[in-house]
Amino acid sequence: MKIHFIGAAQTVTGSMHLLEINGKKLLLECGLFQGHRKEAYRRNRNFPFNCSEIDAVILSHAHIDHSGNLPHLIKAGFRGNIYTTHATAHLSNIMLLDSGHIQEYDVQYLNKKRARRGEPPIEPLYTQEDAARVAQHFHGCEYEERFSPIPGVEAHLVDAGHILGSASVVLDITENGREFRLWFSGDVGRPGLLLLRDPVFPKDADYLIMESTYGDKVKRVPDEAFKELREVVQKTISRGGKVIIPAFAVGRTQEIVYSLHKMIDAGDIPKIPVFVDSPLAIRASQIYRQHPECFDAETQEFIANDEHHNALGFNELSYTRSVEESKAINFVKEPFVVISASGMAEVGRILHHLKNHIGDSRNTILIISWQAPHTLGRRLAEREKQVRIFGKMYHRRAQVATIGGYSAHAGQDLLAQYALSTRDKLQKVFLVHGEPRGAEPLKKRLQQEGIPNVYYPTPGTVVEI
């Protein structure tokens, strides 16, 4: 067997690992590389293999850095099955369509600039029409269901506890008379996250390909984030203000909605309006409701006892689908919470809510996820007094609060436990999906804990097993 480390090697984006087994080719993930525009354009357009020769794909979860280049893979000649959980297939359908829309919009904007410079137009990486074709390739699986993506490989998926439908991939391989197990972690979640079950740890793995995104971090207990959210909402309401939350459409939005539902039911906060104002988040929330089999026991019990029998629905909650409904939120006088995309406050409806509420000291802008440098979200998290929105400078009088405990990624302690759970049989660990600052401390920790063969492959590395 050969492992080609193509994407998410010494970085956290563009996840893609190619396995050559018994003369067949199996691709783990097909994510978009996200970074500087020119580099991203080049890397996403040029696969380092013949797409028509890929026999099958296994997808761990729906995030775009893991799934986002599937439309281009098919456009370039792939004709096989994409194995994943049912929930991931459903989420990926809407996220890829959204990605196709963004690809078209970005190219339209760029081509206007290129035309002014006398340069020829460029084509989008893929369109919404291309993205829609992915659905016919999905082969949905239950957790623990056995399937054979290529000859000599028996596979099954286990819960990774990261987002709805997320999975780790277990491959039992027979090749040249040898039998061994390769375990691919995907993105590992954390115990105690709202809605979802805890991640399943490796068992009897000979080789482990494991993410290392936060291999340098000690993560806080999720319960602390819930308490901090409650305190922020309570304080803002007490001064007559509104809470504005930029949030990613899949995962974070649903966690916040469920948290607020629990707080209102418990009487911890008043029954104030809560708005989810993001078309993608609304579609994602519908898919969450269609897959209660992915929820943990606590959420199942909550749904059974709740008067609405719905973790993501309650009387005070409104999903605003139309632009008119979105605009109407800004005329609500009493305190409310609005959750809107994008998560880094760069595009989308959140910009209108920030523009309309940033100047009132009673309000709170709540940052609940990591913010990339040079984004509006980062400038707000750093509490800059002057920020630019839609090209105009605004003086920030609203309070800014940050909560770091909602991350859906495991930290160093859990990642170490993850690898150590199969230490007795483990021969090699390959750290992926992590920058050096995350991977190197984790590599050192694993070696100190008694796992000597830990590797951090560079892009393009080929390992033969």
Image: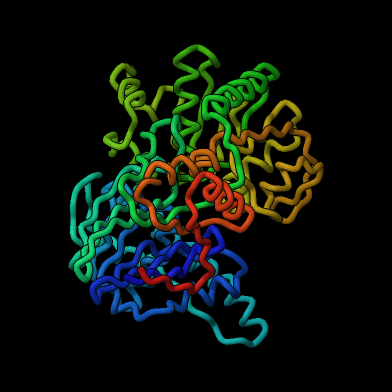
Is residue 45 toward the left or the right of residue 78 in the image?
right
Instruction: Work out whether residue 451 or residue 350 is closer to the camera in this orientation and state it.
Output: 451
Q: Report x, y in % for residue 93.
A: 34, 55
Outermost residue, top direction? 267
Q: Would you say 242 lies left or right of 53 here? A: right
Q: Quadrant of residue 354?
A: top right
Q: Height in image: 180 above or below 294?
A: below
- Residue 36 location, x and y as percent? 62, 68
Query: In this orientation, does residue 307 appear?
Result: yes
**Residue sitting at 35 percent across and 72 percent down?**
2
Instruction: Answer with the quarter of the image where residue 245 lies.
Output: top right
**Residue sitting at x 18%, y 56%:** 147
Horizontal relation, residue 280 to residue 379: left or right = left
Residue 137 higher or lower than 358, as above or below: below
Q: How is the protein colored in the picture? A: rainbow
Toward the viewer: 429 or 44? 429
Residue at 22% across / 62% down in the picture?
Answer: 153
Residue 136 visible at all: no
Total numbered labels = 0
Q: In the image, is residue 150 above or below residue 228?
A: below
- Residue lying at 51% horizontally and 74% vertically, measured from the top left: 43
Quarter occupied by the C terminus: bottom left
Q: Can you give x and y, in whole percent of width and height, for residue 429 in the image?
A: 44, 56
Q: Position of residue 204 (x, y in %)?
A: 30, 48
The quadrant in which the N terminus is found is bottom left
Q: Nearer the viewer, residue 246 or 208?
A: 208
